[in-house]
Image (cartoon, rainbow, N blue to C red):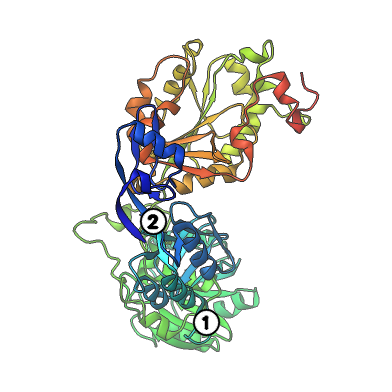
Amino acid sequence: MNFGPTPLEEARGAILAHTVRLTGRVIKKGTVLDEAAITLLREAGRRDVITARLESGDVPEDEAADRIADALMAPLIARSRAATGRVNLFAESPGLFTLDAALIERINAVDESVTIATLPNHSVVDTKEMLATIKIIPFAVPGRVLAVVEAIAKGVGAGRKANGALGVHPFQPLSVGLVLTELPGIKESVMEGAVEATETRIRALLGTLLPVERVRHEEGPVADALARLKRAGADLLLVAGASAVVDRRDVGPAGIVRAGGAIEHFGMPVDPGNLICLGRIGDTPALVLPGCARSPKLNGFDWVLARIFAGRKVTAKDIMGMGVGGLLKEIETRPLPRAEAPRTPPLTSAPRRARTVCALVLAAGRSRRMAPLNKLLVPDNKGIPMILRVVDNVLASHASPVIVVTGHERERIEEALAGRPVLFAHAENYADGLSASLKAGLAAVPADAEGIMVCLGDMPLVSAAMLDRLMQAFDPEEGRAIVQPTFRGKQGNPMLWAREFLPQMLSITGDIGARHLAAQHAARMVEVEMASDAVLRDFDTTESLKGLPEFAGKR
């Protein structure tokens, strides 16, 4: 690939390397320069531009990202479309994410033009959570480089791939038996806390806790209780001792052996969690829990539990391999006492955070083009008002909270949305136009929201999946601070804005929205092409409703 300054007379067909702002027009980086663009540049007084020009054998960035993603695909993993040389991979089910770290490192070592970033191995993931991102750094990849990367990703020359480069192992709805041992003098609150923390963990992994067996802290009663739970159908057996286990021959492990089981490993290089004991009774895993399992804070028990629920056999070798990254104790920079921790245990293997995006649904307008009807309250053939369809779509997405801005016929709008988990923001001066509604909604945006998705109340065809695609593209740190959907290159709605634009959005006046701000910040905007024209279709006249089958015949 050739890169550098290019005279305009030689620039046709080259890729623009940097966004160029002209009077009344922006030519974005990545644009393949045609004669019209070159004419605009020439009229603006430009003599040359920085471009990239592909050479023979080069593969364009989106095609390269596509091909690498295809080579890495596996069951229960979904992918985005390629855009700006990037493809994101997502989980299609709650489960345990695993990867071949050596293989990913081999790919990243092939050439600086190809990068893959992933979550840590054995991360607990939810549906639609991003697992990995493939990013092509320049505008193209040499074909020979891409061929090597594809071969590595597919396992060519590396023998049979047992598990693949990436995998999502769905959680199984296991039944769990818990034996709780008791000693005189142990507070009841301690015992209740152990049950509560354990049940919370199990439910988070889609499991069910059988009725708890409470017995004396003695080998015999523990063995009898384990046998009863196994007969009751337990897929996993747990022993929470009144006294911490300090040896593989202690009460809890001895109870497992007496019940016909065996101890496979005692201790683990994870702190907290050192004193866990791994055993089995037949094919049923049996664990003696460390004392820290009474706390909802992340500990080694969480790591073992997640693997078992994902159908992964946990061995002594697995336990001994958990030391790197296994220091989980609070340190000086994380001084929160365990007793004050939240009651929901964090199940991820490393701290990470999804972008927080709230949604505004603008429903304050006077519907003048459909008067005397209020377009938002026009029911479809099933009697569902348009605003309810729109709000249900937004609620089904990952946006939270959902704020509905009311104005005209406020009471009727709120009545139509009764029972839906939304917040309301009323625009007292809604008659002043769209900007008044927008500002009323923005004033209600929570302080922790990183992005604001502005949805229109008369666009019922925009689905939750479309909204999630916009949120997946949102990343202010990488320059994707404004996200706009398109269909066949035509810009639509809703738009997603980073919090940094709030001051400018709040200064807008008149019957306009914030769309014009996007032109001022073109370098920080990304367009997401959609598969349908839903993002272009609003329904604000009786004539337009005729094009919406669900509202056919409505006047």
Q: Is residue 162 above or below residue 44?
A: below
In this picture, residue 440 sits left or right of residue 128? left
Q: Quarter-wise, where is residue 368 in the image?
A: top right
Residue nearer the viewer, 323 or 226: 323
Which amino acid does the dot numbered 1 rest on? Lys
Residue nearer the viewer, 177 or 523: 523
Badge 1: few (under 14), some or many (20 or more) residues near its Cα, within 10 Å?
Answer: few
The residue that disc 2 covers is 53
Name the secondary structure under disc 1.
Answer: loop
The residue that disc 1 covers is 161
**Mark 2 vs mark 1: in front:** 2
For image coordinates 38% across by 47% down, the residue present is: 11
For image coordinates 47% across by 49% down, the residue present is: 472
Q: Quarter-wise, where is residue 56 in the image?
A: bottom left
Image position, residue 70 (x, y; %): 54, 66
Quick one: which residue is furthest to the front in this view? 9
Numbered badge on residue 514: none
Q: CA distance from mark 2 to mark 1?
A: 37 Å
Image position, residue 101 (x, y; %): 40, 75
In this picture, residue 383 sits left or right of residue 507? right
Name the secondary structure under disc 2.
Answer: strand
For image coordinates 40% across by 32% down, the residue present is: 518
Screen quadrant of the C terminus: top right
Badge 2: few (under 14), some or many (20 or more) residues near its Cα, within 10 Å?
Answer: many
Image position, residue 408 (x, y; %): 57, 14
Q: Quarter-wise, where is residue 457 in the image?
A: top right
Residue 352 can be seen in this image: yes
